[in-house]
Image (tube, grey):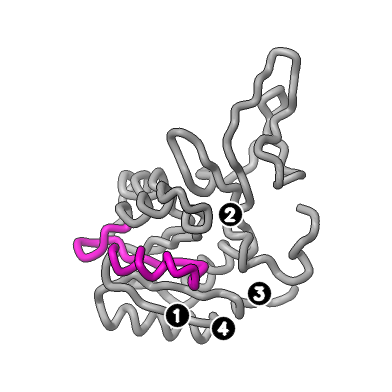
Amino acid sequence: MRATTYSQCRVLIVERALMVRRSLRQTLLQLGVEEVGFAASHDEAIAALRGGHYNAVFTDWSRDVDAVQLLVALRRSGDERLQALPVVVATSQASGAQMAIVRNAGMTEFMIKPFQPSIVESRLRAIIENPRVFIVSEYYIGPDRRRFRAQFEGPNRRQHTNIANNDRRRHSQNHVPPGGVERRHGRQGYAPPERRDGGR
């Protein structure tokens, strides 16, 4: 099995606690991440991300950093590059209700503090190896919140063999497909060389 490479990852850590920042940075660099930057607040993060240098975000969610506000700002920015950035949310408390909040705000992955290096790697690997379809609709912008693939047959079945098309539902005489953009989340900067520019 080929090892995942993180050499093209440039991660922005949004975290105010210095020790957490250092620990996460060290873990990411040991995994082979190309570059790791820091932001201590929502505003600093947005300013850093607008430069276009980073292609993934690991953000705290606490009284110090509002991950939901950051997610909403990115997903509703109108900038396609910012909208599609993979965002991993880390918090020390996680209830089902909290999970639903950040999931509906458009998070990509979630992890609990304190985290082991293996957990950090699993979240990074999920972004790279298992990118989810990215949804842009009136009510939700973010990676597909469904994490399982159910078998379904019918006119509304989504077809993802051609990821470039806006909508891949099967067409029927009485079915009018809705508009909207869908694309493979996290593709830019993450697809391994043998998969890049290839069929999906």
Looking at numbered disc 2 in the image, what kind of residue is underneath it? His
Q: Is residue 17 left or right of residue 147?
A: left
Farthest residue, direction left: 63
The magenta segment is 43-67
Q: Which mark is residue 36?
A: 1
Q: Label 3: which residue?
A: 4
The percent position of residue 106, horizontal first and vertical second, equals: 43, 49
Q: Label 4: which residue?
A: 32
Taking depth in this image into account, of 79 and 45 the one nearest to the observer is 79
Residues under labels 3 and 4: Cα distance?
Answer: 10 Å
Residues under labels 4 and 1: Cα distance?
Answer: 11 Å
- Nearer-N-terminus badge (2/1): 1
Residues under labels 3 and 1: Cα distance?
Answer: 18 Å
Q: Is residue 12 left or right of residue 113?
A: right
Element assignment for label 3: loop
The percent position of residue 91, horizontal first and vertical second, equals: 31, 63
- The part of the image, by quadrant, that contains residue 191 is bottom right
Element assignment for label 2: loop
Looking at numbered disc 3 in the image, what kind of residue is underneath it? Thr
Vertical placement of residue 31 versus 63, above or below: below
